[in-house]
Image (cartoon, rainbow, N blue to C red):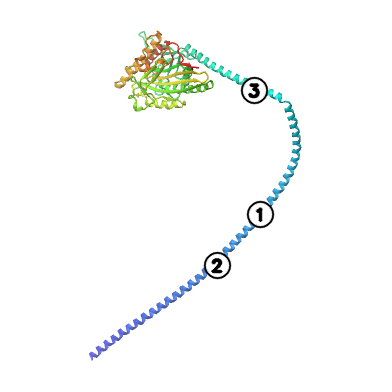
Amino acid sequence: MDDLCQRQRIELDSVQQQNGREIATITDRHQEEVRDLKRRFDREIEDEKAARLSALGKLTSQSALDTQKSQIELERKDREITTLHDGLQTLKTELDRERRMVHELKLNLDTTSSNSATLESSVRALKARIEFLESGREEQSKSFERCNQQMMDAFAETEAIKEKLRREETLRRKLHNQVQELKGNIRVFCRVRPSLKSEPASDLTLMQYPDEADDGKEINILGPEERSSLGTVNRKNNTFSFDRVFNPSTQNAEVFDEISQLVQSALDGYNVCIFCYGQTGSGKTHTMSSADGMIPRAVHQIYETAQGLEEKGWRYSMAGNFVEVYNENLNDLLGNPDELDKKKHEIRHDMQRGKTTITDITTVNLDSPEMVETILKNADANRSVAATKANERSSRSHSVFILKLTGQNHITGERSEGTLNLVDLAGSERLSHSGATGERLKETQNINRSLSSLGDVISALGQGKEGGHIPYRNSKLTYLLQFSLGGNSKTLMFVMVSPLQAHMSETLTSLKFATKVHNTHIGTAKRQARVRDA
């Protein structure tokens, strides 16, 4: 019984499991069918949707196309209307123009009728004029001959006037030289530099200019107050007289006015030497080489005068050198700065022609006055400058600007050769005052030796002995300036004065030397000129 029950339970479980599997199979098949139906319905819906969208797109495109066609047609109609309107305006304009032309033609017809009458009158007048001219031909020929003769007379008179101007130019040069000789072939000007802002009034020397309102030739140097044993207070009064004295307020323009005639002499064919002498810091370089100094002003004047002489037949060429004498050696201030103190230059004199040349020196043709500014800058950069106790930027060499002027008159054949030497001397100072040692001591000794030689040369020239020895060779400076210091030249010395009380001793020494030069007469200058052979 138990076994039967057991088998029945087993069979029942088996039947239940089989039924479960059949139910699951039926359920799965049913769900698959549902999914298939859903997928088919979805496809049908999508197809229907696509069909409807396609139909809608076609309708939209057709509508847009119809709208575009309508717009194009509308624009075409507008253009046709505009064209018709423009054509109408053009026709109106042409009609107005035709009306104006008709009106103008009517006016021209009236004017032509009037002109025709005028032309007929002119033709009659011209016929009468022709008859008159034919009858007066002989008289007109005589009138032409008179005019031609008057023109020839005017040409001859012009040539005579030009010849007179040339003779007057020659006479002017002769009279100008005579005036310069009357003033003295060696002249001395004194110039006192103004005080600097850093120099208080208590440090200045008391200076007076007694004849400042008249000739301006005197200067008084008053020493410091000294009390005598009797208790009286005195001042030493040192009076000096020169060809001209410039007080501290004088500008370079006024100074140049006084020397401009000497510059003219160089253009006329004379040797001219202008040099600045004085202690360190007395204003020598400012007077000679500043932007408005004597060198730039001299060159500008020479150019202006040379241009004025062109109409009288003169043509000038100008060439410049710039050298320094440093420790009794010559340096080319316009050459290569690396060759300073290395390249040797020799001074050579042509005794017959009275000309000086320097070997291996740079010569610059001065085509314009502006070139002088460049030359001065180059020379200033190369010039030997060192610090001394007397002046922080004291120039330690003599600089010489040599301007050679050659003139040729293509009408008269006359030729002139002049030389203008503008010299900025190194500072003159006593060894005890300069505080120089070592190399600076050697420089100071050479400077003082060359300045002493300059004084010896001027003194020897002043003695005026025929054939007497002139010690030009005692220094390179005097040997270089030999033909510009002798009797065949015109010389001007600027003695530069410092206003400081501390420099008073040096000032008096400079003024005494200048007085010695002022009392010297070096003879009559000769012009370097000749006439071309016929």
Asked if the residue under mark 2 is in contact with the one under mark 1, i.e. CB atoms within 8 Å, the reply is no
Considering the numbered disc 1 on the image, is that residue within a helix, a strand or a loop?
helix
Position above or below: 534 against 127: above
Q: Which residue is mark 3?
A: 148
Q: x and y percent of residue 450 in the render?
A: 35, 16
Query: Dot 3: within a 10 Å radius of its alpha carbon, few (fewer than 14), some, or many (20 or more) residues?
Result: few
Give the mark nearest the N terminus, 1 or 3: 1
Q: x and y percent of residue 368 in the render?
A: 47, 26
Considering the numbered disc 3 on the image, is that residue within a helix, a strand or a loop?
helix
Position above or below: 192 against 72: above
Q: CA distance from mark 2 to mark 3?
A: 102 Å
Q: x and y percent of residue 208 in the render?
A: 44, 14
Q: Which quarter of the picture shows residue 334?
A: top left
**Quarter placement of the N terminus:** bottom left
Q: x and y percent of residue 206 in the render?
A: 41, 16
Residue type marked 3: Asn
Q: CA distance from mark 1 to mark 2?
A: 37 Å
Which marked residue is nearer to the observer: mark 2 or mark 3?
A: 3
Residue type marked 2: Gln
Q: Which residue is mark 2?
A: 62
Which marked residue is nearer to the observer: mark 1 or mark 2?
A: 1
Give the mark nearest the N terminus, 1 or 2: 2
Give the mark nearest the N terminus, 2 or 3: 2
- Front-lying residue, 36 or 390: 36
Asked if the residue under mark 3 is in contact with the one under mark 2, i.e. CB atoms within 8 Å, the reply is no
Q: Which residue is mark 1?
A: 87
